[in-house]
Image (cartoon, rainbow, N blue to C red):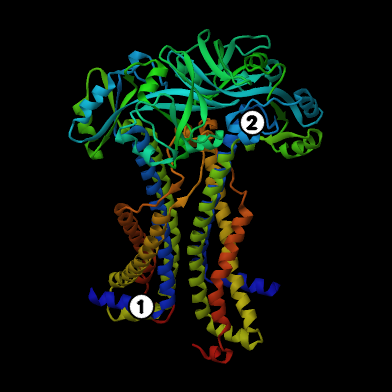
Amino acid sequence: MIQLLKMAFRNLGRNRRRSFFSALALAMGLALLLLLASFVEGEMGSVIDLTTRLESGHLQVRAKTYDENKTSLKWQDLLENPAQIAAQIASLEPVQVATPRLFASGIVSVGSETSGVRVIGIDPLSDANAPFRDGLLSGEFLTPEDREGILIGYPLAERMGLKAGDKLNLSVNTSNGDVDEQMFIVRGIYSTKTGGFDRITVFLPLAKAQAITQTDNHASTIFILLKDKALTEAVAAAIAGANYQVLTWEDMNELILQTEQMANGYIYILYLIVLAITASVIINTLVMAVFERTREIGILASLGMKGRQIMAMFLTESGLLAVGGIIMGLIIGVLVVAYFTRYGFYIGNMGVTGLLISDTIYTELTWQDTVNLTVLSFIITLLAGLYPAMMAARMDPVQALRGGR
Amino acid sequence: MRLYFRLAWRNIWRHTRRTVIIILAMGLGLALMMFYDGLIVGFDEAIYGNAIRVLGGNIQVHAQGYRLKASQTPLLPLPDDQAVVRAAQELPQVVAATRRINTGGLASSREGAFAVNITGIEPEKEAEVNIAAQNVVAGRYLSGDDGDVIFIGKGLADAMGVGVGDRITLTGRSRHEQMRKRTMTVIGIYDLKMPDLEKRTIYISLSEAQSLYDLNGQSTEVAIVLKQVGQEAEVIEALKPVLPGYEIDSFEANFPELQQAIQSKSGVMNIFSVVILMIAGIGILNLLLMAVYERTREIGILGALGLRPRQISLLFVLEGTMIGLVGVVMGIVLGLMINGILMRVGLDYSQFTGVTDYTALISGRIYPSWGVEKLLWRGLTVAIISALAALIPAHEASQNEPAQSLHYV
């Protein structure tokens, strides 16, 4: 075995440049795939992370009849006494924070311009609103007692030419199916760097939101963040009650999970194509090596080397080539990925509103992807080596000695 | 020069197998790009094809200042909408030119509320060209003298739990900054199989919109329907001198984000494809290195016959480029096959229509095109990369000393 490795290594060393370039082809392929995988992982990871933090939480508790697509404000579709329910849930050990939220639809208008928005009534003191508080660009955050303040997103402010302190008109639907209009003062402008969310979401203090929508002491949902995502199911079971529905982040984010699945499917096809191209470069190099060494193979065979052993020798060569290429590829790949993990990849505003995609994507390389791709490229390189190795093994020693085929 | 071509062509086929393998690699790379290009065009077409019909025309004319605020649909009346209509109708490419009022509002019922685009249309004039008018599934389409009735999509009807005859409250802003609230009866429901889009668009008659939003006899938009897609540019050129001070845009301008999404995705894909082609380029490099080595004596003979080093280099660069170009041919065949199959089958996109405003316009499946739109560029990229890959071996070949090479065994 050691003998075989030594021979293979020396054989590769005989034409260093060619071996280097073959390994480089593999390295480039692997690096490209690592970047791709980390990009998708970073994108999907950030989508899930953003959606959880901004929109869905890990869990939500809603009234039995509440339908997310309708933003109904009928009392029977809402939770009564939400503060009390939230406090109960918050007292559970794995729960990081639980806070009531009220959803309504509305339009913001300034002058003759209008823009449809989603109004969320929040408890300004809750830690669950940290992304908005930390993302404050100007003005200040809401306070529970605020009766005329509203918090709006940066894209909306920019489009409507609003600054902190400006006035706007907000019309929202109410519990009896009517629409009510009121003037508000822009208290602050926030940005979560997620255009799709910031553009359509405005915040009011819960008490004010309840007042304008005539939903006294009611909320649409209890938004819950856990200390550990893995405990979602356990907590969901613990708080399940007859009067309301408990939704996990998986229930609420089906679209994201589907998108992720589709992306993974497509990306595997891409992996295979890139590796097939890499493999054909390697096949070619090895085929040429076999031809060059026809006489040598003849000598080895006449000295008593079996076909299997000759095959093993060439396979070892491709194995060594693979190892070299993979090491190079990992170095290049990790460096490139590290750059984008640090500085991000600006994709700008693609008008995505259905998913929460941040305007900059930070690549994220997982161990799983790294190991998978490394193993995959190793296997494909070995498979690529199979054909030349078989060719070498099948040579007739007498013919080969004469240099023929 | 022709001699070089012939020599190079013969040389690359001296070892069929290795050439074919590299050609396959190049072809695979190119086919992947064609697949991508085809998908992008298919995506575009799926969206734009419906966009024209949903927007009410290939071209929209607005008053000055509208473009900047387009997403807020400001109520900016056209100075003389009749003149715009007349000017458009004089052009031979124009099928119809209709006046509209576009504004944002809130549609609400006991069940819930939705932010919607309210579009006031001239029912009779649009009957032939409006896609919603042709897909009525319940009740009836609008008529000119309708008051207090609205025509909504199935997506919205389902979401709000309303049917024909039910009442919806419509809230919007009039020109003089007053809130207008009106309860209206659903007269008809249309179904375009695009629920996400239907949720956002409702129609009322123009006269109703005029009285609701204080735009007596005025409108904010003229939508122009053309005989064919692709005539937009010439019609816009023809209209511009006649209609100074108006903003005339083709339908694409309504989707700035789509353009950006496609641009940034194409940018990533371009980098990606260059890397893939470089990998295949390494294959060409290795192959030619080997060829130089094998043909040492031959190169010596060529040198002895009087070929200059530069000419020998040229021969090898030509060989590399030719392999690349045959790869392009291979790629075209593969790409056409892949896209040909997908054009028949289509790719299901229905789950993801809610992701953006523009994907809401996709009704079900996407059918890619042949993917030949950028073929010239792609082919050129392949040729350049192949030629670059051939440089090292070519240089090597030219450095051989003829006298020594001739003695090489």
Can residue A24 be seen here? yes
Q: Please report the residue visible at 39 percent of the width from the left and 22 percent of the height from the top.
A: A208
Residue B213 lies left or right of residue B27; in this view the side is right
Q: Are marks 2 and 1 in contact (CB under 8 Å)?
A: no
Q: Secondary structure at mark 2?
A: helix
Q: Secondary structure at mark 1?
A: helix
Residue toward you, B182 or A206: A206
Q: Quadrant of residue B304?
A: bottom right
Q: Quadrant of residue A122?
A: top left
Residue A243 lies left or right of residue B87; in this view the side is left
Residue toward you, B126 or A157: A157
Residue toward you, B329 or A107: A107
Q: Amino acid at mark 2?
A: Ile
**What's the mark number on residue A266?**
none
Residue B1 lies left or right of residue A45; in this view the side is right
Decide: is B44 above or below A321.
Answer: above
Residue B30 lies left or right of residue A95; in this view the side is right
Task: Provide the residue designation for mark 2.
Answer: B52
Give residue B335's position: percent from left, percent from top.
55, 50
Can residue A305 be seen here? no
Task: Provide the residue designation for mark 1.
Answer: A11
Q: Amino acid at mark 1?
A: Asn
Decide: is A124 above or below A230.
Answer: above
Decide: is B330 above or below B304.
Answer: above
Density class for disc 2 (Cα within 10 Å; few <14, some 14-19, many ≥20) is: many
Residues marked 2 and 1, same chain: no
Give residue A212's position: percent from left, percent from top.
42, 18
Give residue A54's position: percent from left, percent from top.
37, 36
Give residue B73's position: percent from left, percent from top.
60, 28
Q: Please report the residue visible at 42 percent of the width from the left and 53 percent of the height from the top.
A: A36
Which residue lies most toward the top here?
A: B165
